[in-house]
Each structure stands twice: as C-alpha cells, then as structure tokens.
Image (cartoon, rainbow, N blue to C red):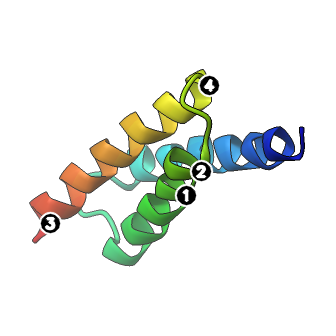
Amino acid sequence: MARRVILVPAALLGLAAAASVAQAGPAADVPQLVRDWTALNAACRGGRGDDPATLDACTRRDAVDRRLKATG
C-alpha cells in the first residue's frame, strides 16, 4: 500500500512535467527537459507494471527523451 501512495505524487509530477514540456515549445530549456525526464523516469521505473500511470510515465519519458536528443 505504501508503494501506491508514492506512485500517486510521482504520476502527478509526471503530468506537471509533461505540461511544462508542452508549453516550452521548440526552444525548450534543456535543464528543464532533464528535470522532466528524471521525474518521469522515476515514475516509470518505480511504478507497478500493471498500473496505467506507470505506462503513461514511461510513454511521456520517451517523448521527453526524443526532445532531448533533438536538441543535441
């Protein structure tokens, strides 16, 4: 049960991170992208495999990863 309590804030953080990336536009701040990726990675790797929030965090992390690679 304690693990679930930790996942809820991590999932919310992932949503906030994704919103931050979406608002940043093409000239996104790389340090912010790294912070977003780190938060989403923690939610992705720390989540349960059968939790939809975990899959969502992994999907969003992968999108941020592509943005980071595109910025060089």
Q: Toward which corner of the image does residue 47 lie, by quadrant? A: top right
- The residue where tag 4 is placed is 51
Query: Nearest the camera: 67 or 26?
Result: 67
Secondary structure of residue under mark 2: helix
In the image, taking residue 23 as reference, residue 13 lies left or right, namely right
Residue 14: horizontal and vertical position, in percent?
58, 46
Give the answer, above or below, for where 52 lies relative to 29: above
Q: Earlier in the sequence, mark 2 or mark 3?
A: 2
Marks 2 and 4, how far apart in space? 11 Å
User: Pointers 2 and 4 in contact (CB under 8 A)?
Assistant: no
Mark identifier at residue 71: 3
Secondary structure of residue under mark 1: helix
Q: Amino acid at mark 3?
A: Thr
Q: Nearer the viewer, mark 1 or mark 2?
A: 2
Q: Amino acid at mark 1?
A: Ala
User: Pointers 2 and 3 in contact (CB under 8 A)?
Assistant: no
In the image, taking residue 12 as reference, residue 29 lies left or right, namely left
- The residue where tag 1 is placed is 42
Mark identifier at residue 19: none
Marks 1 and 2, how far apart in space? 6 Å
User: Pointers 1 and 2 in contact (CB under 8 A)?
Assistant: yes
